[in-house]
Amino acid sequence: MKAITKREHETLQAKLMQVARDAESPETRHTAEEALLALQEQYQAYHEMIEQLKTCIMEYRELQKSLRSDILVPALREERKATKYSVRDFQLMVTK
């Protein structure tokens, strides 16, 4: 999926404005005006969704960091400690 650039949007917007302004046919002018309005509404919706996505990504990263430091790291530390002791115990049992 490719992002919508401001330049692409402004280029298309300018072309539609030109058609709406210069069209001889009222039907063509009306169609261009409607298309311009739809384009602007869709571009606004796109930007709102991008902002929502940014917020979602930030919240996910914060949650990920919190889960790692609060749950995962201590659990792995405990597992490592338990494994060390069981390996030592096993080695002691083998040598006896």
Image (spheres, rainbow, N blue to C red):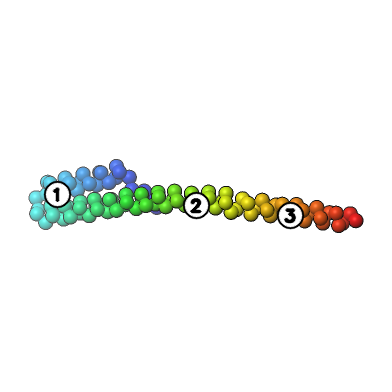
Query: Label 3, label 2: how many angstroms apart (C-alpha)?
Result: 28 Å
Which residue is at the far top?
7
**Residue 42, numbered label:** none
| Residue 81, x across and y down, in percent | 72, 52
Seen from the viewer's position, the closer of residues 65 and 30 is 65
Task: Assign a secondary structure to mark 3.
Answer: helix
Check disc 1 and report the residue beneath it. 20
At x 27%, y 53%, the residue is 42
Q: Amino acid at mark 3?
A: Thr
Check disc 3 and report the residue beneath it. 83
At x 20%, y 51%, the residue is 36
First in sequence: mark 2 or mark 1?
A: 1
Q: Quadrant of the C terminus?
A: bottom right
Q: Amino acid at mark 1?
A: Ala
Task: Assign a secondary structure to mark 2.
Answer: helix
Q: Quadrant of residue 18?
A: top left
Query: Label 1, label 3: how many angstroms apart (C-alpha)?
Result: 74 Å
First in sequence: mark 1 or mark 3?
A: 1
Check disc 2 and report the residue beneath it. 63
At x 9%, y 50%, the residue is 24
At x 82%, y 56%, the residue is 90
